[in-house]
Amino acid sequence: MSITYLEAIRAAQARALADDPRVFIYGQDVGDFGGAFKATKNLAREFPGRVKDAPISEDAIMGAAIGAAIEGMRPIIEMQFADFSTVGFNQIVNHAAAFFWRTNVPCPITIRLPSGGTSGSGPFHSQSLEAIYAHYPGLIVMTPATVEDAYSMLLEAVAIDDPVIFCEHKFLYYHLKADCLPTEAMPVGRARIARAGRDMTIVAYSAMVHEALAVADELAAEGTEVEVVDLRSIKPLDTDTVVASVARTGRLLCVGEAFPWGGVTAEVIARVAVEGFGLLDAPPQRLNAKDTPVPFHPDLWSVHRPTARSIAAAARNLLRL
Amino acid sequence: MVQTIVGRESETESAPFREQYVKAFRWMLLARVMEDKLASLYRGGKIHGGVYVGRGQEALSVATGLSLCKGDVFAPLIRDAAGRLAFGEPIIDAVRTYLGSALGPMRGRDGNVHRGRPREGLLPMLSHLGAMISVVNGMLMARRFKGVTDTVGAACIGDGATSTGAFHEAINQAAVERLPLILVVANNQYAYSTPTSRQFACANLVDRAVGYGVDGHTVDGTELGACLRGLEKAVAQARQGRGPQLVVAKLLRQGGHGEHDDASYIDPKLKESSLGRDCLKVAEDCLRQKKWVDEKTLRAWRDEVSARVDETVAKVQREPGPDPFKENWCALASKHLQEAHI
């Protein structure tokens, strides 16, 4: 038996619904239809009345989630695409994120954002918004890269007493498979050494972890040992694991699929510069998407975002510095 | 969908109504005196940030607060001191939040009108207008999930907020879910300085009720009796399971947007019109005219309210503000997930 990243997300939601009567799912087309990506397939039937279709109203969807959370529920919100969460941005960043700080009343909401690019999806169905949400105090931002993390982190997201932005990568939905669901998990906030190496560190998260692992394979054939750090959650960001890796390798390349200005790669490099400057043997490098909207055409798209090819080029360049 | 218009002519004078009217008037008086005091503290430089008062809107606000029961949800806006008091917010919450007392419900983390007690169904407003409506929807949905019936929720907004996407999304959502939401619109003719002619083009905001598939109610916001009766009816219909109720009241803001604003843009003709009447004065005249209260009692109520406000302010002025060195500076309920490296 094998299970995909998408099936893991569905399974985690089924388990959350089964385990906790406070959990419900609310979002566009999530009911009988089972969601645009089928992440809630059959859940409306298995859990009558607890998987609710919403009107196309991201602001009101998030507002309702906040109200339900205040009343002690544990809503899971599916934004049909991460891109559309910007319509509910106000409720997420000004309301949900600030609520506990202002009132001392927790606001536990899991906001699932189908994120990242897939070929042909264009500017409005491809974005990676994790950095924007991580900017706001009061939010947890998860970016699972594996089937196991997709499952266990989604369950943890539901259990956390704060609003969690759960960035699930659409490219991984069907491509990524595991033999079975995990029975144990690393704690939230801890990064994972996805591959050990001694010559350079590539810090990545979400789909970019797999591109980085492909690069590590490629460079291993040339005699270079690349260490790949999977951040797992970008907020909190496990600076200790990153700095410890840089202490071993002396070289840092940070890769993200989001737009380049600011963002996760900048944050990682800033932290390493502040806390591990003396550990660096070369200037830290970063690789992001290009500073344009995400293009539609596959030839443009494959160059717009980092890929194993462009990451390998950046890695080789870093080794020469 | 039913559209009702509640004005002066439909007033009855039954004993319970008279009792409710008097009770409402006393909350209005307390709100007015308290806010006048806050305004004077602001002018004296004793309050940080703005002061936003409900002068001229007390009748509508108090009717909303009084129409709700304990256990209901209330999302007031910036001109709802009277409704808050009637709903059960202690007067000291307002004073502490304005003066930044560490002992207030917001503990200096948020100020002035951004106060509430969510666990008691009183929501602290966001400045982003229209945002609170869907939150009330969510609370009502949660209660439905939990099998709690017979509670309703009221959200207050102004004419300006009816132009927001949040308003549209939320009233439509409430209609789809057929929630017991009472959406109270105080059409006070100006959104900050913008007149309604630049805000919407429909003849009357209540006409929108038809489009959303909800009941609509028009009340005269300057008449306490009309407000009490209109809100009572709307809340009863929501409680009976008739779905969302849109209540629109016309009135005129008796002052600026906040105490910093001299309101020089308000059309003098509006001030002279019947819309420009001060609802507190109208209610007081009604009490006199109907001989429901004598002069001596009215004076005693005023004295009592002033003393209560002065005592509260004096008490709060002696309370400590928040200590930045003792503040934990953690925005998360899950403290173990707070960033350690920032």
Image: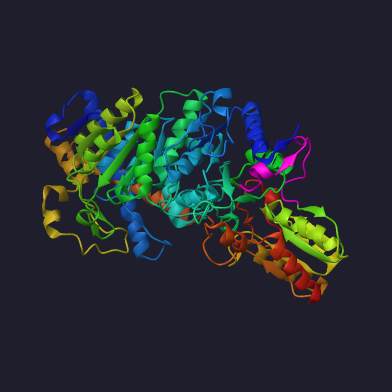
- Magenta: main secondary structure equals loop
Residue B266, horizontal then vertical, whole percent: 19, 60
Q: Is residue B21 visible?
A: no
Residue A314, horizontal then vertical, whole percent: 72, 69
- Left or right: B317 in relation to A164: left
Residue A203, horizontal then vertical, whole percent: 74, 60
* Quadrant of the image occupied by residue B60: top left
The coloring applied to the image is rainbow
Identify the residue at image location x=29%, y=32%: B214
- Please state the extent of the stretch shown in magenta in the rendering: A168-190
Identify the residue at image location x=76%, y=56%: A214
Furthest toward the front, the residue is A299
Task: Please identify the quadrant where the N terminus of chain B is shown.
Answer: top left
Identify the residue at image location x=56%, y=58%: A132
- Left or right: A296 in relation to A276: left
Q: Is residue A159 magenta?
A: no
- Left or right: A129 in relation to A87: right
Front residue of A308/B113: it is A308
* Quadrant of the image occupied by residue A179: top right
Q: Is residue A172 magenta?
A: yes
Identify the residue at image location x=19%, y=24%: B14
Residue A161, horizontal then vertical, whole percent: 62, 42
Task: Please identify the quadrant where the C terminus of chain B is shown.
Answer: bottom right
* Quadrant of the image occupied by residue A257: bottom right
